[in-house]
Amino acid sequence: QILTGLFLAMHYTSDTLTAFSSVAHICRDVNYGWLIRNLHANGASMFFMCLFLHVGRGIYYGSYLFKETWNIGVILLLTVMATAFVGYVLPWGQMSF
């Protein structure tokens, strides 16, 4: 995620008027930009799938009984959710509204 995100950031403009067109530019004009963007998007989906499996395993084995572990897990979950929200808003496409 970090490597693909850095590559995408090299070609991305964050202005609200040109953000969507810069994503289209990455997909159409940058060599293998479409592949990097799809790897980045699918990597985020796989990360969340692993995260949900991890939470399910913690619930199954009763890891939530340890208060400190539970509190750190909730803080990390909120951080990941905030990061995911920013990731959806950043391209300024249809899902950003």
Image (spheres, rainbow, N blue to C red):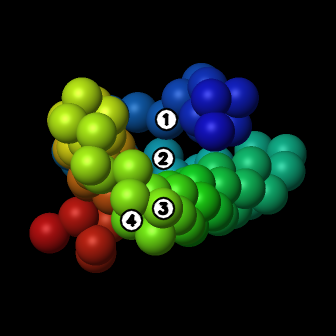
User: Which residue position holds label 4?
Assistant: 59
Gap in angstroms between the C-alphas marked 1 and 2? 6 Å
User: Residue 59: in sight, yes or no?
Assistant: yes
**Kind of residue sitting beneath label 3:** Tyr
The number of numbered discs placed on residues in the rendered structure image is 4
Residue 12: which numbered mark, if any? 1
Q: Residues within 10 Å of mark 1 (few under 14, many from 20)?
A: many
| Label 1 secondary element | loop
- Give coordinates of residue 1: x percent, y percent: 63, 39
Q: Would you identify the image quadrant in which residue 34 lies?
A: bottom right
| Label 4 secondary element | helix
Residue 83: which numbered mark, if any? none
* Position above or below: 60 against 33: below
User: Which residue position holds label 3?
Assistant: 61
Q: Residues within 10 Å of mark 2 (few under 14, many from 20)?
A: some
- Disc nearer the start of the sequence (1/2): 1
